[in-house]
Amino acid sequence: MDQHLENELLKSPEESEIKVCPGSPFPLGATFDGKGINFSIFSENATGVELCLFDSVEDEIENVKIKIEEVTHNVWHVHIPGLKPGQLYGYRIYGPYEPHNGHRFNPAKLLSDPYAKAIAGDIKWDDALFGYEIGNPEEDISLSDTNSAAFLPKSIVIDGQFDWEGDKQPKIPYHDTIIYEAHVKGFTQLNPEIPEEIRGTYAAMAHPVTINYLKELGITALELMPVHHFVSDRHLIERGLSNYWGYNTLGYFAPDSRYCSSGILGEQVNEFKNMVKELHKAGIEVILDVVYNHTAEGNHLGPTFSFKGIDNCSYYRLTPEDQRFYKDYTGTGNTLNVPLPFVLGLIMDSLRYWVTEMHVDGFRFDLASTLARTLHDTDNLSSFFSIIHQDPVISQVKLIAEPWDIGEEGYLVGKFPPGWAEWNDKYRDCIRDYWRGAESKIAEFALRFTGSPDLYKGGYRRPTASINFITAHDGFTLHDLVSYNEKHNEGNGDNNSDGENDNNSWNCGEEGPTENAEINALRLRQKRNFITTLFLSQGVPMLVAGDEFGRTQSGNNNAYCQDNEVSWLHWENADHELREFTRKVIHVCKDHPTFRRRRWFQGLPIKGSGMDDVMWYLPEGIEMPEESWNHDFAKSLGVYFNGNGIRCVDYDGNRIKDDSFYIIFNAHSEALDYILPTEKNGDGWKKIIDTSNGFIGEEEETFGDGSSIKVQARSVMVLKCPVT
């Protein structure tokens, strides 16, 4: 123990005239009950716990330290009458420091409460934040006695009071959902129509300019990249970068204070709530990207912020051969020990809190396969899924999995249980390959376009189990997808070694920006192709913020550390014509239930004959024969959607009908003449979308059965006729 810390430890409860009561083990965290604050924290292997109270964020040492005497079922608890919301606090926890046995207790290190509802400020990187002596030849086997309180953000007690004004969650069905993935700061930081003093904050996301933009575009669900309080890695800070994306969680209950416009301690909670309330008023849901697979404490050489010092061997998966080391299924150095009841309870309490207290509408789970792991293998009947299905609150919101991790057997696309939707990377890769002209079988394109029944049709799942996306935060933007063959991540400081090497991209003939008008025209057409394909596919479409107006990251496909103009949306450079095209395509999708089916098409889409709701055609106007489905060179097909074939009813019991549609995809480098199929046309076909020239509307000209129509190279044409 640091002698200075030992000598300067703050007043005892008696000296401070603080009354100490036993308190209650539940709820966990710090809870104001009107008379005082109850503190409780779980640690199975600790030998002693001290509650540390601070007067200000800048305090380098606690002004009061209270030894917690009460322990119930491994929960240490105390009640302090007279304390009020706004109180800053942390913990020091005693126990063995035996890394080889999984124990890393070190009372010299101030620890953040895992259940803190708010956290003050950011990490100030210093060697004191590590439980061992930096530079010691024994590395983490050594023990550091340097006090870390000056460098760790303090936990804040909140009162939880907020006027929701009767807020109700929109509860938009999956088949009516349009997801928009955005970053709180990056989306608003450069928007000149938003007041400068609130840009980059929750308040900016709640501003009428933001909300009107989302409504006009047609968005129904805003999926926010991580807002749980997170840490920027030391090596990034030392490079002049930061952890912009936020996949490095410190507090699972605390909205990050860096996105708060006021700077007032704890105000980030109410500002976040107000954002949700305002979005709900506009009929827009809020989905959080959450990271329950790992924490910000890294591997055995990482810092001690919270879990590592509270009870390392309980919170983390350790290698059985030597518990000094961590099982790493996430690529971040550690993996949370989800099968342990109290760790699983932490996750469930966090999810429930964000639904009940913060009113969010769903979650996208980063590296969700990690949560399904029992010991080593993944198990879709694991305790995590079982308890979620039994929870009356969490089971009722949107649950979206990123269905993979980096461990063995961690790729689980199509294998999550009913009630879950999944990011469908097979859709992403297939659609990218089709439009870049790669040798890919057209049968897979048909499957992906119709909701991936090969992945999701079993177990009473529906097409909406597939979250369809062309791009995401991780990887190229849509503009860069058609502008770069190679990644360009030099600005990240890792010699361009980070990020995916295989992006299924095509630069259309020249790498990066060009003055070649033909290449730029082709790139624009390709963007329209991707947008049209995405929103006319069965499943739930997800659009990344800025793709609708051509945002670029200059070829950086891993901009996780770029909290700057590389990642922020440049509104002044927006391609307004592309944005308007995207808006109109989204509204075509929303206006026609044919593109938002709740049920599967009859049979598999590649069987050809015998189906009245979807049929597939060659350019000659004849049905696709069985042998054509597996041709690598097939780059064109026509798809007939029968508006009478939706085969479902609305919530009032009325049978749903729609117009019929004929969609022609031509990924060839040359134009093709297409013969429209016979006996499908009621009052004649009218063109409503043509990506070759950006047309979207309804042409006056009518095409009859058997008519020939020219479809330009690398384009989509959509025809419509009313159902009689």
Image (spheres, rainbow, N blue to C red):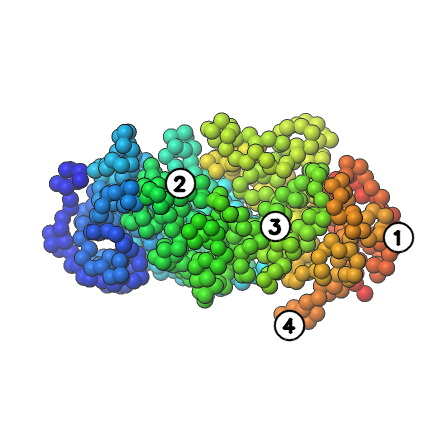
Disc 2 + disc 1, Cβ < 8 Å: no
Q: CA distance from mark 3 to mark 4?
A: 28 Å
Query: What is the quadrant of residue 247 in the picture?
Result: top left
Label 3 amino acid?
Answer: Asn
Location of residue 486 with respect to 363 vertically, above or below = above
- Residue 706 badge: 1
Q: CA distance from mark 4 to mark 2?
A: 52 Å
Which label's residue is closer to the chain start, 4 or 1? 4
Which label's residue is closer to the chain start, 2 or 1? 2
Label 2 amino acid?
Answer: Gly
Q: CA distance from mark 3 to mark 1?
A: 33 Å
Label 4 amino acid?
Answer: Asp
Q: Nearer the viewer, mark 2 or mark 1?
A: 2
Residue 411: percent from left, percent from top: 53, 47
Q: Nearer the viewer, mark 3 or mark 4?
A: 3
Left or right? Give the position of 359 relative to 104: right
Q: Residue at x 22, y 42 (%)?
A: 108
Q: CA distance from mark 2 to mark 1?
A: 62 Å
What residue is shown with label 4? Answer: 652
Which label's residue is closer to the chain start, 3 or 2? 2
- Give neighbour class at mark 2: few <14, some 14-19, many 20+ (Cα, 10 Å): some
What residue is shown with label 3? Answer: 468
What residue is shown with label 2? Answer: 333
Disc 3 + disc 4, Cβ < 8 Å: no
- Residue 87 badge: none
Of 201 and 369, nearer the camera is 369
Q: Nearer the viewer, mark 4 or mark 1?
A: 1
Locate the N terminus and report the quarter of the image it occupies. Answer: top left
Label 1 amino acid?
Answer: Gly
Q: Secondary structure at mark 3?
A: strand
Residue 511: percent from left, percent from top: 64, 28
